[in-house]
Image (spheres, helix red, strand yellow):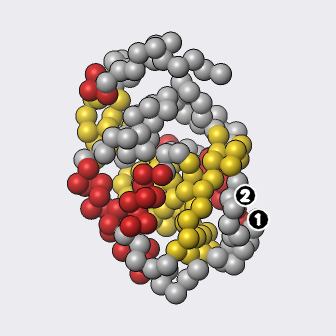
Amino acid sequence: MPTKPSTIQNYTEFLSEILIDEDTLQKRIAELGAEISRDYAGEDLLLICILRGGVMFLTDLMRHITIPHAVDFMAVSSYGVGKRESSGQVRITLDLNSVVTGRSVILVEDIIDSGRTVASVLEFLSTRKPKSLTVCTLLDKDTRREVFVPIGYRGFTIPDRFVFGYGLDIDEYYRNLPFIGVVDLKKYHLEG
């Protein structure tokens, strides 16, 4: 079990820049909600959020989806405290309570980089025979893609930078920030 840092840095100490500000985030999320509402009208829509990073995005997104929809959650593990990229080995640590069979399913993610984690979750969900299955991601680091991911809805394509805020963490902290920031790794340190 990793040790808890004895001192947590204020994010202003290692924030290199604000990549996407709060207003820009919220405007784009409203647009995504309108697109999903239009595309899935009359469907039995289920939004599946991968915990924990996607929760803020899901909460704001579902406020802008004007058609009836259900929500469920999954937790998967492919990173760890102190890790900066996926190990590529995905474990499902929390499975769904909802039935997926015959439903229109959108997997809601905070960020996709290599695509390995999301591809594994999609493969797992497809065995449950949904009517349709696609991905809605807030952030897409497409230059890091190693496997194909069927992204139906994309908030922003971003450069290969280490980002945090708005649900994305650094060692489980800083998810609460209302913007997407870039980390200056020379200034960030995990004490413990």
Above or below, 130 relative to 113: below
Q: Nearer the viewer, residue 129 or 1?
A: 1
Instruction: Name the residue furthest bottom.
Output: 42
Mark 2 residue crowding within 10 angstroms, few (<14) / some (14–19) / many (20+): few
Residue 74, x across and y down, in percent: 63, 53
Residue 176, located in which quarter of the rendered image? Answer: top left
Q: How many marks?
A: 2
Residue 12, x across and y down, in percent: 26, 26
Above or below, 120 relative to 164: below
Is 54 on the left or on the right of 159, as rendered?
right
Q: Which residue is rendered at x = 76% and y = 65% of the image?
A: 127
Is 186 on the left or on the right of 94, as rendered?
left
Q: Which residue is mark 1?
A: 127
Instruction: Name the residue furthest right.
Output: 127
Residue 153, located in which quarter of the rendered image? Answer: bottom left
Q: Which residue is mark 2?
A: 124
Q: Which residue is rendered at x = 60% and y = 56% of the image?
A: 73
Q: Which residue is rendered at x = 48% and y = 84% of the image?
A: 41
Q: CA distance from mark 2 to mark 1?
A: 6 Å
Is 38 on the left or on the right of 106, as rendered?
left
Is 56 on the left or on the right of 19, as rendered?
right
Q: Amino acid at mark 2?
A: Phe
Q: CB of mark 2 within 8 Å of CB of mark 1?
A: yes
Above or below, 83 relative to 94: above
Residue 76, x across and y down, in percent: 64, 45
* Residue 159 visible to an observer of this rendering: no
Give the quadrant of the N terminus: top right
**What secondary structure is found at the residue carrying circle 1?**
loop
Q: Nearer the viewer, residue 15 or 145?
A: 15
Q: Amino acid at mark 1?
A: Thr
* Residue 109 visible to an observer of this rendering: yes
Q: Which mark is residue 173?
A: none
